[in-house]
Amino acid sequence: MQAKLCTALCAALFSTATFAQVDVSNAWARGTVPAQTATGVFMTLHAHTPARLLGVSTPAATTAEVHEMKMEDNVMRMRAVDALPLPAMTDVELKPNGYHVMLLGLKKPLQAGESVPLTLKIEQGGKVTEKTVNAEVRALTAPAAAHGAKGHQH
Ligand SMILES: [Cu+2]
């Protein structure tokens, strides 16, 4: 009887203690030139148990959206995704020409060496938590195709 009670209690305690078990590494933002108001942020997400990235916010821009880039009819297009699935124990890479966080309405240009604070909204095991990350700003000319390149449409 007592063992049974403990099992239930421990399970309850454990489930409330497991939050935001998602590791974020290599977060970076592409630097911008003065007239530019949008840029991409990239990172690697690794969830320990299945999770979903529901959204992103930052004080550096009016809007932050999770975007997916895909080849459609030979044109690279991007669209906003509602939630990005993060399978357990799998690295999900946000990278140029793939999933990325799009910052729209930048309040000021991003210069290499600065960092951009981001708040990630993550759902995991039925709970929504927030995780803060600092993305390092890299030069506009950082390797990989520039965001907003030819044929890249919203
Ligand atoms: Cu985008």
Image (cartoon, rainbow, N blue to C red):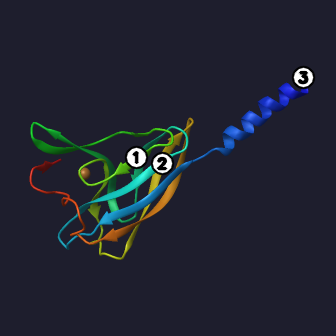
User: Mark 1 falls on what kind of element?
Assistant: strand
Q: Residue at x 73, y 34 (%)?
A: 11
Which quadrant of the figure has residue 26?
A: bottom left
- Point out the tag, 1 or 2, that comes first from the N-terminus: 2
Q: Is residue 9 above or below residue 20?
A: above
Amino acid tagged 1:
Val
- Point out the tag, 3 or 1, that comes first from the N-terminus: 3
Which quadrant of the figure has residue 60?
A: bottom left
Q: Nearer the viewer, mark 3 or mark 2?
A: 2
Real-space Cα separation, disc 3 to disc 2, in angstroms: 39 Å
Which residue, given by chain and number where applicable, does mark 1 sit on?
A: 92
| Front position in the image: 93 or 153 | 93
Q: Is residue 20 above or below residue 8?
A: below
Residue sitting farthest toward the top: 1
Q: Are marks 1 and 2 in contact (CB under 8 Å)?
A: yes
Q: Are marks 3 and 1 in contact (CB under 8 Å)?
A: no
Q: Position of residue 95 (x, y in %)?
A: 30, 53
Q: Position of residue 16 (x, y in %)?
A: 68, 41
Q: Which quarter of the rendered picture does the N terminus lie within? A: top right
Which residue, given by chain and number where applicable, does mark 3 sit on?
A: 1
Q: Residue at x 78, y 29 (%)?
A: 8
Q: Position of residue 147 (x, y in %)?
A: 20, 58
Amino acid tagged 2:
His
- Point out the tag, 3 or 2, that comes first from the N-terminus: 3
Which quadrant of the figure has residue 70?
A: top left
Real-space Cα separation, disc 3 to disc 1, in angstroms: 44 Å
Badge 1: how crowded within 10 Å, few (<14), some, or many (20+)?
A: some
Which residue, given by chain and number where applicable, does mark 2 sit on?
A: 46
User: Mark 3 falls on what kind of element?
Assistant: loop
Side (left or right) of 75 relative to 37: left
